[in-house]
Amino acid sequence: ASIPFLQLSWSGLSTLYSRPVNLSSNPLRSFLSAVETGTLLRFAFIAEETEILRDTELDWLYSAGFDRWIGTVLDYQERYRALLDRVEGARPVSHALPMEDIARLDYDNGVSVYVNRGSSWRKVDGLLVPPQDFAVLDRGGDAP
């Protein structure tokens, strides 16, 4: 993970969106990257059957069929919405890598988001972070 300089610099000045999560070679990694950088989720879909795209110049959109993504989209959106409810109106103020596979994004309202890109549970700042997932710590207005 790298420091999200652009996201920290532009926060509050412009709305930043992720690359389409469903067009990524690793959608879960793209989802976690959006969480880590504070960017909003974006997806790209087509309404037609994607089979018509096979062996055409648009075959890169083959994975954009809505029907195959609805469950994942709803899951990601629900989880991200819960996070946004906790940081709405707050600005990201710092990004840290407190340990291997763990990134932390701190907001000015005292909320910290920990992203675990590893394959095992990690304990950081007293918080257990599941593998390939994220967890939120609310310090009640006290930024770390």
Image: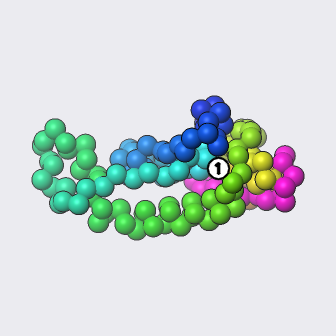
Q: Which residues are magenta?
A: 129-144
The residue pinned by badge 1 equals 115
Q: Is residue 52 magenta?
A: no
Amino acid tagged 1:
Val
Q: Is residue 130 above or below residue 33?
A: below
Colour style of the rendered protein structure: rainbow
Give SS at disc 1.
Answer: strand
Residue 120 point in image, percent of width and height: 64, 53
Q: Residue at x 35, y 62 (%)?
A: 69
Q: Is residue 120 left or right of residue 34?
A: right
Q: Is residue 130 left or right of residue 98?
A: left
In which quadrant is the N terminus drawn? top right
Residue 16 point in image, percent of width and height: 53, 43
Query: Which quadrant of the figure has residue 129?
Result: bottom right
Q: Residue at x 30, y 55 (%)?
A: 45
Compare residues 22 and 15 and report the one nearer the observer: 15
Q: Residue at x 61, y 47 (%)?
A: 38
The answer to whether residue 78 is visible is yes
How packed mark 1 is, by other alpha carbons closer than 10 Å (few <14, some 14-19, many 20 or more), is many
Residue 88 point in image, percent of width and height: 67, 57
Q: Is residue 35 above or below residue 49?
A: above
Compare residues 7 and 114 and report the one nearer the observer: 7
Query: Which quadrant of the figure has residue 105?
Result: top right
The answer to whether residue 123 is visible is no
Q: Is residue 120 above or below residue 11?
A: below
Q: Residue at x 34, y 51 (%)?
A: 44
Q: Is residue 107 left or right of residue 67?
A: right
